Amino acid sequence: MATKQTPSANTTDAQGQGPRDEHQLAEQLAQLDELHLQATQATYIAFKQAVDDTNKEITSFREAVVGPTSKDIFKAASASQTAKPKGIKQWRARDDPDWANPTLKRRRLS
């Protein structure tokens, strides 16, 4: 029957350089604890930066939607809707055979 061995302070280290004393173990544990804290801080800083960047994007989007250019577009759409209450004529692909060709579409818009 195999016996279980319990770890002790006198076990050899990973490099096989002899017994480890409690002082070395405490130093190594402190170093691992510091690495853990640094990783946690780095993750928090990256998360905070992502939140800040997202907030800037949302603010930019809100300014674009509520800005003067958008207001002018919505005013024009409202005026068009008032002038033509039946709405805009429905678009059909057969009326525009080159609708899927981006080169021809760009030339037409230019």
Image (spheres, rainbow, N blue to C red):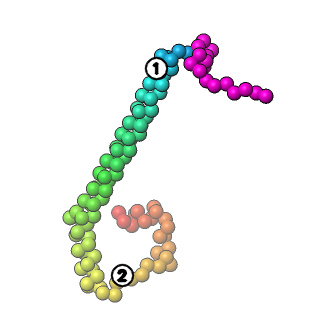
From this viewpoint, which residue is outermost toward the right?
1
Crowd tier of the residue under label 1, counting other residues whose Cα lies within 10 Å: few below 14, some 14–19, many 20 or above: few
Given the image, on which type of amino acid does mark 2 rest? Ile
Q: Report the number of discs.
A: 2
Height in image: 100 above or below 78? above
Pointer 1 residue: 27
Q: Is residue 59 magenta?
A: no
Quadrant where the C terminus lies? bottom left
Height in image: 83 above or below 8? below
- Residue 10 horizontal/vertical position (percent): 59, 16
Height in image: 82 above or below 71? below
Magenta residues, as a range? 1-19
Q: Where is residue 108, by image quadrant?
A: bottom left
Q: Where is residue 69, by image quadrant?
A: bottom left
Pointer 2 residue: 88
The Cα–Cα distance between marks 1 and 2, rounded to whole angstroms, is 76 Å
